[in-house]
Image: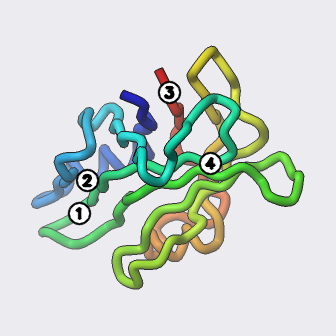
Amino acid sequence: MAHLDWEIKASLLMYVMGAPGGRIVQDDAVGGSGASFHFPLDPERTPDASAASSSFAFTGSVVFIGHFGSFVGEVADIEVVAPADGGADWAMSIRDRESDVRTAAFRLAGAPERDGDRLTWQHVDLTEDGAKLWGGNYPVGTRFEPITIDLS
C-alpha cells in the first residue's frame, strides 16, 4: 500500500522517549515505530496517485508527549503539494489539533529524488507557521528528517 515514510526528527524522538512520562502515541492508521512512521495514502483525497502527481494526502497521526504527560507536538493528516507558482520547493502541511486547520508546516526543498515509484526529499525544513505548532521548541528553518513517498 502506498505510504509516506518519515522518522520526523531523531532528537525529538530521543527526547520524548527519554523524558519521565514521555511517550509516542500513534493511531491505528500509522504503521512503523520510533525509527520510522508509515502514514498510509488517503485514496479519497489522492485517488490517482502516481510519481507524476502534484499532490498527495495521507491519513493518521502521531502525538508526542514529553515530561510528565505534557503535549510536545503532533503530526496528523499530512499533505504534500507541488509548488503552484512554478517554484522549486514543495510544501508539506499537517492538521493543527487546536484549530483543526491545515498548516503549511514544512518546506520540502527542490524537486524530489525519483527512484521508480519512490519520491524522496532530503531537506525538510520547518516554516514560520510550523514553528508555532511546535510551541517555539524548534525555530524557523530547523531541519527535520527526510521523507519518502512510496507509491508501490
Q: Earlier in the sequence, mark 2 or mark 4?
A: 2
Q: Which residue is mark 3?
A: 151
For the residues marked 1 and 2, what is the alpha-carbon distance in whole angstroms? Answer: 5 Å
Dot 1, crowdedness within 10 Å: few (<14), some or many (≥20)?
A: many
Q: Earlier in the sequence, mark 2 or mark 3?
A: 2
Q: Which residue is mark 1?
A: 66
Dot 2, crowdedness within 10 Å: few (<14), some or many (≥20)?
A: some
Looking at numbered disc 2 in the image, what kind of residue is underneath it?
Answer: Val
Q: Are marks 2 and 3 in contact (CB under 8 Å)?
A: no
Q: Are marks 1 and 2 in contact (CB under 8 Å)?
A: yes
Q: Nearer the viewer, residue 112 or 66?
A: 112
Against 88, is 78 above or below? Answer: below
Residue shown at 35% from the left, 75% from the top: 97
The image quarter containing residue 130 is bottom right
Residue shown at 42% from the left, 31% from the top: 2
For the residues marked 1 and 3, what is the alpha-carbon distance in whole angstroms? Answer: 33 Å
Dot 4, crowdedness within 10 Å: few (<14), some or many (≥20)?
A: some
Q: Which residue is mark 4?
A: 55
Q: Are marks 1 and 4 in contact (CB under 8 Å)?
A: no
For the residues marked 2 and 4, what is the alpha-carbon distance in whole angstroms? Answer: 31 Å
Left or right relative to 118: residue 33: left
Q: Where does residue 100 sit, x and y in percent of width and height?
A: 39, 79
Q: Which residue is mark 2?
A: 16
Residue shown at 36% from the left, 51% from the top: 59
Against 68, is 99 above or below? Answer: below
